[in-house]
Image: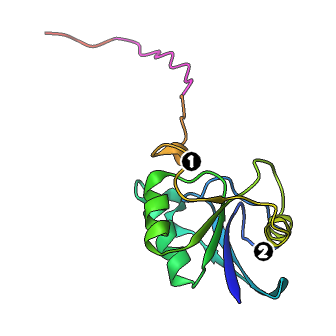
Amino acid sequence: MSIIAVPSMGNGGLNDQISPRFGRCASFTFVEVENNDIKAVKTVPNPAANAMGGAGVQAAQIIGNNGANIVIVGFLGPNAANGLNALNLELVQAPNETMTIKDVINLYLEGKLQKITNSNVASHYGMGGGRGMGGGRGMGGGRGMGR
């Protein structure tokens, strides 16, 4: 029996889409597989999704706490990779395309996904590069009564 963890875009489950971001995914879907058959599915919210820092490490702890021994990931930063490697888990690269958790699990069971051993993006990759484009037209009236 294997338990495969997959980062999920929404609430998780076989019909949810895989999230490319490991540490900052919305939830994790844990799929119990025996003899290439799906036996059980469990979803767990990811409280690290909005963490200021350390999301990858916290997410790795969630994986370990839920007994997974295989993790299918899209983008995996160095801290998350170190945390998962410390748990002696099998890391598998997800395809770089939008698909359901069930489709990704089936690709894994068919032997069509490659194992990875380390991070595949730099630290803080999933933090978002928000470039605020505010048009800040400060329209203060400038009526200070200087003395």
**Which badge, 1 or 2, comes first in the chain's sequence?**
2
Label 1 is placed on what type of residue? Asn
Q: Position of residue 71 (x, y in %)?
A: 63, 69
Q: Residue at the spot x=56%, y=19% of the render? A: 135
Residue 13's tag is 2
Q: Nearer the viewer, residue 130 or 120?
A: 120
Q: Which residues are magenta?
A: 132-142
* Mark pair 1, 2: CA separation: 25 Å
Q: Is residue 44 magenta?
A: no
Overall secondary structure of the magenta stretch?
loop
Check the image and report above or below for 142 versus 56: above
Residue 120's tag is 1
Q: Position of residue 134 (x, y in %)?
A: 55, 24
**Disc 2 element:** loop
Residue 16 is left or right of residue 122, and the answer is right
Q: Residue at the spot x=50%, y=51% of the render? A: 77
Q: Nearer the viewer, residue 89 or 20?
A: 89
Q: Residue at the spot x=33%, y=11% of the render? A: 143
